[in-house]
Each structure stands twice: as structure tokens, then as C-alpha cells.
Amino acid sequence: MTRTRLGVAVIGFGWMGRAHTRSCARIPMIFGDRDYDPDLVVCADSLEERRVEAVDSFGFREATDDWRAAVEHPDVDVVFVCAPNMLHEEISVAAAGAGRHVFCEKPVGGTPEQTVRAEKAARAAGVVTGVGYNYRFAPLVQYVKQLVDAGDLGTITNYRGRFFSMYGADPLGLLSWRFLLDQAGYGVSTDILSHSMDLAMMLNGPITRVMGTAATFIPERPLPKPGGTHYDRGAPGDPTGAVTNEDYVACLVEFANGSRGTFEASRAIIGPESQMAFDIHGTRGAASWNLEKLNELQLYLADDRARGYTTVYGGDRYPYHGHFVPGDANGIGFEDLVTIEDHEFLSAVTAGRPHVPGFAEAVDYVSVQAALIRSWESGHWEDVVSLREE
């Protein structure tokens, strides 16, 4: 079988840079029916130890401290952007301008305006884009999408979305770039709420109005150390700096289909470890899913005489799951979702077709985010105005 070689560059070799690299290496072993072969050409990172690791342990042909050199490398076809948020726009625009297809970890921009500019540049360049809303590809989430589209849940009336994470709950957690407006853009509304709302719009359609609030519960944090991440910790008495974006956001929303919803996101909450979760309710049934138990779905069907929720376990009868493990209740993990989304993206690149979610879907989210920001500033309901440009 003849396959298309796709030369890969990864920009930023932190957690997600490594995850996408591993997925590119795993894809040939998992998706035998693919039409392409990923080729790990070059990794760009500012830290020498990461560059050495990228070549010696992960299999890149070369590494550089200059992301521009990686983007412009003649053997590169696809760029995975995994750098800090406020670099996403510049790197994505440069990659598109060089004719490279671009997969950008969310957010595509740290602010709505940056995301809009990046999408416009990629569209003008005619490249395929992808954005890292990987929870869309959880097999049981795909199953819920099938149920909704088939009308098995009836007319949707209520939606509850949330992403609660403890990564910022420790006051001694370092003041990494994620906590700074000038380096990350907005806080949880950019970082984790985007996952929750993107999933809601995939399952339940567009959001038309929003009323929200935001707060920063930990206003000061210890200053960062070289190479540190938002999971690292300082000590009492360490010098501190100000947190300049939000720890928490919540909102009421109205969907275009007439249903109502609520959303919350917090990085400074105690209890939930990584509760990216939703509850969707219709006139004939309901479904609930939580990343912390990604291989389980709570499903309620009103015509089931047993009444009440039933636990549905993941298995090879649901989309993608069987590529990783056979049978039922044999679980898959987070990086498997990354592998699925990368396979979908690279398949779209090979076929020359749009990938969903791409930068256009990222603009759909920031259109809601922009209304949310206006709302937490005004204290009133705000209409969502699409920021997609013709």
C-alpha cells in the first residue's frame, strides 16, 4: 500500500508536545488502514535538555531552539504548535504562511482577537487546521453524539458543562505563564472552559446568549524557576508575583435550539482532580460523562422499564476504542484520545479536506468567550456575535 509521507515538526516539547510526538510514533501500530506515515523531522524547544531528549529518546531527526527554522524546514508538511498560549498566533500564522498544515493545541490564541487572526491567516493560506479539543474523540462521547443525533434522548432541554481541575489549587504553585494575562491570555475561560463549551456545541449546537461571572481566588504565587511548569511548587517565604487572569468562571447560557445550560470552570478548586464533565438532558433520556471515569457513561432512557441511570462501559463497539483494546470494559487513556485526534487530523491533511475541530471551531468558541467577558464586566446578559470572518 502506498502511503503519503507527512513530515512533522513539533514546536514546544512540554507535556503536550511529547503527547503528540508519541501519538505520531504510535499511529502506524494502531491505525493500519491509514493513508499516510508520520515522519518526525524536527522539534523546537528553548531548553537544551528537551532538544536532546527529542532526538535521543523520541526519534526526531533533529532539534533546534529556533521555532522559525522548524516551521521553514523543507521536509516539514505539518506543524504541531504546543508552545505557551501567547505564542500560538505568531507560530500558527508563520506556519500557514509557509504552506504548512497546522495543528494548534488549544487555545489557538490567548485572546479571542488572536484566534480570529490565526484562523483568517490559515484560511487565506488554504491549509488544513486542527485544534486540540481531544475530548470530542472519547469513544463514549462519540456514542452520546450518535444518541443525540438519532433523537434517542428526545428534544434537548438542559445542559450542564464543567471543568474543575486542582492544578492551581495550591497557593504555593508557581506563577507559571498560565497565570499571566500577557503570556497565557485569559485564565480558565481560555484554558479549560474552552474544552467544556466546545464539547457542548458539538453535542447540542450553537450558544446564542450568555451571562457570567469570574474571579481570581489566589492573587499571588511564588515566582517560577527555569524549566518549571504549573505543576511545580514553591516554598513559604519565596518571592511572589501577581496572578493577572481568572481562576474561576461560571455562566448561564441559551442554546440556539432553545435549551438552557450552565457552565463552570475552576483551576483553584479543592476536590475534583480533572473533572471535565457534562450532563445532557432531553425529553426521552439523559447522559452524563466525566473525564475522571472516561471509560464509563451514565445513560438514562425514559422508555427503559428499569428506570434510572445505567452504567455503560467503554468497549470495541464504540468509535475508535477497538483500535486500542478489544472487548468491553478494557479501558483506554488520555493519550489514546490524543492519538485518535492526531490520526483524524493527519487523515484530513492527506485527503485534502477540512478537519473538525479546526480553527473555525476555535473561533466559534471564542465568539462565546468574548460575550462571556463582556458579561462578567457588564453584569448583564450578552448576545453571542459570531467572530467568523468571510
Image (cartoon, rainbow, N blue to C red):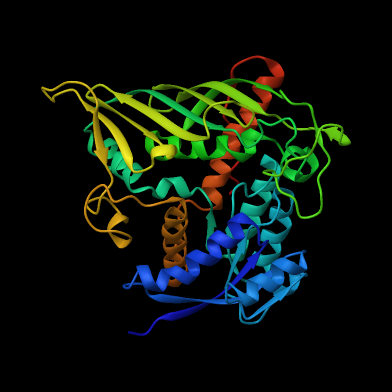
Residue lying farthest front? 236
Closest to the observer: 344 or 62? 62
- Residue 386 shows up from this direction: no
Q: Quadrant of the N terminus?
A: bottom left
Residue in the image at 28% along x and 39% along y: 149
* Residue 292 against residue 56 in the figure, above or below: above
Closest to the observer: 220 or 96? 220
Closest to the observer: 347 or 240? 240
Residue 35 horizontal/vertical position (percent): 38, 75
Q: Quadrant of residue 302?
A: top left
Residue lying farthest left? 305
Residue in the image at 75% along x and 50% along y: 228
Residue in the image at 70% along x and 66% along y: 50
Number of labels in the image equals 0
* Residue 250 against residue 132 in the figure, above or below: above
Q: Is residue 316 left or right of residue 126?
A: left
* Residue 338 against residue 261 in the figure, above or below: below
Residue 197 horizontal/vertical position (percent): 50, 35
Q: Is residue 98 left or right of residue 224?
A: left
Residue in the image at 55% along x and 66% along y: 21
Residue 321 horizontal/vertical position (percent): 31, 55
- Residue 323 shows up from this direction: yes
Closest to the observer: 47 or 177? 47
Residue 25 horizontal/vertical position (percent): 48, 71
